[in-house]
Image: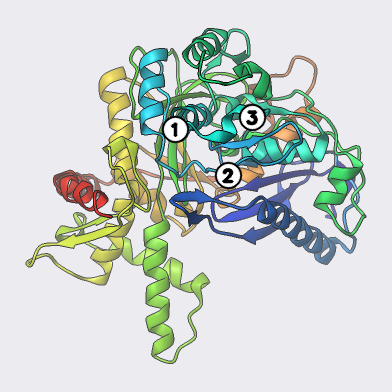
Amino acid sequence: MKPDLERAVLGLELGSTRIKAVLIDEEHRPVASGDYVWENRLENGIWTYSLEEVVTGIRACYQALAGDVERKFGQRPRRFAAMGISGMMHGYLVFDRAGELLVPFRTWRNTITGQAAAELTEKFQFNIPQRWSIAHLYQAILNGEEHVKDVDLLTTLSGYIHLHLTGRNVVGVGEASGMFPYDQKIGDFSPRHVELFDNLIAGRGCPWKLRDILPGVLPAGAEAGVLTAEGAALLDESGLLEPGIPMCPPEGDAGTGMAATGAVLPRTGSISAGTSSFALLVLERELKGCYPEIDVVATPSGRPVAMAHTNTCTSDADAWVRLFAQFYQAMGHEADLGKLFPKLFGLALEGEADCGGLVSFNYFSGEPVTRTEAGRPMFARLPDSRFTLANFMRAQLYGAVATLKLGIDLLVEREHVETDRLLGHGGFFKTEGVGRQIMADALGVPITTMKTAGEGGPWGMALLAAYMARKETGETMEDYFTQRVFRSAESQSSLPDPAGRAGFAAFLKRYTACLSAERALAAME
């Protein structure tokens, strides 16, 4: 059945390797999509994307979606019921009063703010990870960087795009909670911590107060402006897209991950696994301790969440698959990555439960959970290890989730956090049954994925926009998702396999024993 496009809802997310848009119908089903492939670049020691490519990417992504709509339904879209923008959380985007970018975008992937993160964590008695926007700002101050005095706006990638599409300088609660400590009671950045920060930088030549340069904070369901004529022209160069479309608060990829899995109530959790990975456990109570390995963020509606985050997940496994594709091409065959990825990932389940003694580190950048300062992908084996392709691929997938497992173990062992269900989404789960079983064996809990798991963040963003547009008076985001979106959602689950659990435990023992070698490599120039 052809959907009413003017009642459809658009979600667009700027991820680490893809910008993707998903259009959903009135039943919250994806009906069209588009994407744009990009990569971060390491320039002068900084992981970054150019803002020129940000604009190019969202335009190309939208055009791909519009083309998909036209192919399927015979018309190009002109209007939607609602829209929402999401993106990689954290990072550092600062602009002066004229709206000029002061320094190249510093993404979440950078581990260059160690001093700032440690000092702020000690001062706040609240963990400030290196990825957070406030850590980047304070590190720039500690470094004596010239641009700091000119900062008029500090925002995130989704906040930047939203500002250009609507003219409003706001972010959603989930996104805000990855910039600076969030106060659930007042629904805003914590005034106590704002005051502590302002006192900390007094006398350092900053002519601004922190709250004046941060965006406004809006909860899920709030209207965050409408698409302006300038915004419509920015997104759709054809001129067909009409202004006036209501837009929900822009969110980070953690918030959209929770939305995409429906994991928004206490004792539920989600795992987003792709270029990076993070487990988000919605808490029944605030954590008692302060742990440098664990972020405390919030759901899009403001509930407290513990996040175990790793900077790299599938990047190294992806790189090996592409290397095998080159071998295949060298043998005179056409390498179809769409077939090669599931074939090689599927082989992982044929490998020995402990990977035959192989160990793989997927670190493309530093990992705070294991206190590793820089990225050094590493593969190791003993002379008597069983070096087979199946064992190798299993080691790649085990290595992709090992650091996440270490972070979750901390929450379980020290805070006794309990979770009734974990739902997965993202590229790691794309090959049917493989990522789900590997993750279940690694974490020792059932892992559920939904039919929409591969759509991930942009679908979650579309759901948040749909909630804003369609909610009834007094209807909470949690009720909307539970009763209207996920009640009859198709899902599949994998239970931990006893042999798989024992095998992963043996792998993790070798993995932690090799951490000293990984750290030594990280110290090399």
Check disc 1 and report its element: helix, strand or loop: loop
Residue 163 higher or lower than 196, as above or below: below
Picture quarter containing residue 433?
A: bottom left
- Residue 392: percent from left, percent from top: 26, 65
Residue furthest to the bottom: 332
Question: Circle 3 sits on which residue?
Answer: 151
Picture quarter containing residue 256?
A: top right
Of residue 167 and residue 236, the one placed in the foreground of this image is 167
Q: Which amino acid, by three-letter code, is at mark 1? A: Asn
- Residue 192: percent from left, percent from top: 52, 7
Question: Circle 2 sits on which residue?
Answer: 105
- Residue at 79%, 29% in the rendered image: 168
Local crowd size for mark 2, using a 10 Å CA cut-off: few (<14), some (14–19), many (≥20): some
Camera sees residue 417: yes
Of residue 106 and residue 497, the one placed in the foreground of this image is 106
Quadrant, the N terminus: bottom right
Picture quarter containing residue 306?
A: top left
Badge number at residue 454: none
Q: Distance between the residues labelled 1 and 3?
A: 15 Å
Look at the numbered discs 3 and 2 and tell me whether their residues touch, using CB distance below 8 Å. Answer: no
- Residue 50: percent from left, percent from top: 62, 53
- Residue at 34%, 30% in the rendered image: 293
